[in-house]
Image (cartoon, grey):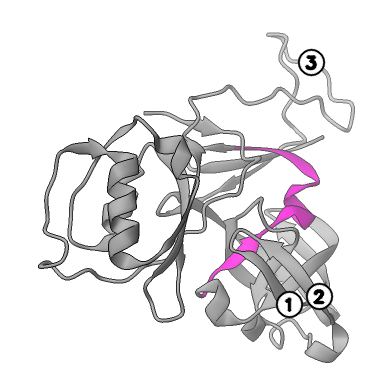
Amino acid sequence: MKSMVHWYWVTPLLLFGGLVCAEDAPSRSGQVDVAVELEHLMSEHGFKLRGIEQTQGVLGHVAGADLRVRLDTLLEAFDHIIVQSPDGGVERVIILGEKAAYVPPPMVSSVDGASESDDGGASKANEIVLETTRKGASHAVTLTLEGIGGQKTEESMLIDTGADQVVLPVSLMSTLGMSPSSTRSQSVQTANGSVEAYVGKLSGIWLGETRISDVEVAFIDDQRLGGNSLLGMSVLGRFRMTIDDEKNQLTLASK
């Protein structure tokens, strides 16, 4: 089913959860009440759950012995986040809402004054189209980060509108020519809640051939991010954004 989602909600950050013994969670399939099954899994495995009220009266499928797989299958009709705990289990599940139906992308007038096309649609010359890869229910893009002194590195980044800034693991600081002394300590907001981070500015981020300069970035402990980097609102907030689930494409257009 084709789905085009306007991503003004927190983009799912999918991290691998723990395993469930076959004796504790036997493999089974079929339709169940999603809310009831979520309550059962939460009670059995002790993770936190937010947004369960949105699943009331909805039927879903249950399959597999792995907890993460079971949750993904159960919530396949919903945009959701599964957050990993430090010991590798499932710490939190956040249900964002039912997946949106296909919505045509916005027609955007060129910032350079490009003329209308013959069929009446606006030119898309000012749009940035990036290929995405799937990480569970999430989309990721590979971008080039430019640090102090022009040092560059490519990084795969999850699209996360719930993050105020671009969020990177602390281990990347030296690669980008940065250090704690060149940043400030600050509490930042991510999809997983508020965390302490080292906040500074990258010289630039390359979105394909387009360079965005002076981008605010937050460095967080690698374990808290589960090895992921997040493309947050310090970049995404500059654009109107759509994601094509079928084509695996992110389109950024001038506001």
Residue type at numbered disc 1: Ala
Residue drawn at x 11%, y 59% is 26
Residue position marked by numbered label 2 in the rendering? 186
From the image, state whether disc 3 or disc 2 is nearer to you.
2
Residue 68 seen in this snapshot: no
Q: Is residue 73 above or below residue 196?
A: above
> 110 or 73, which lies in front?
73
Q: Is residue 238 above or below residue 149?
A: above
Stretch in magenta: 227-242
The disc, 3 or 2, on the residue closer to the chain's N-terminal end is 3
**Left or right of 25 in this view: 133:** right
Residue at numbered disc 3: 116
Snapshot quadrant of residue 36? top left
The residue drawn where x is 83% and y is 19% is 115
Kindly report the distance in space between the C-alpha atoms of the residues bearing marks 2 and 1. 5 Å
Foreground of the two, 183 or 68: 68
Disc 3 versus disc 1: distance between alpha carbons?
Answer: 45 Å
Question: Residue at the spot x=86%, y=61% of the render?
Answer: 213
- Image quadrant holding the N terminus, namely top left
For numbered disc 2, what is the local secondary structure? Answer: strand
Q: Amino acid at mark 2?
A: Gln
Please check the rendered image and state whether residue 178 is part of the magenta-colored stretch, yes or no. no
Tell me the amino acid under the disc marked 3.
Answer: Glu
Q: Which residue is labeled 1 in the image?
A: 197
Tell me, yes or no, whether the two marked residues, 3 and 2, touch with CB atoms within 8 Å. no
Count neighbours of disc 1 (C-alpha within 10 A) and say few if under 14, some if 14 to 19, many if 20 or more.
many
Q: Earlier in the sequence, mark 3 or mark 1?
A: 3
Secondary-structure class at tag 3: loop
- Residue 241, magenta (yes or no): yes
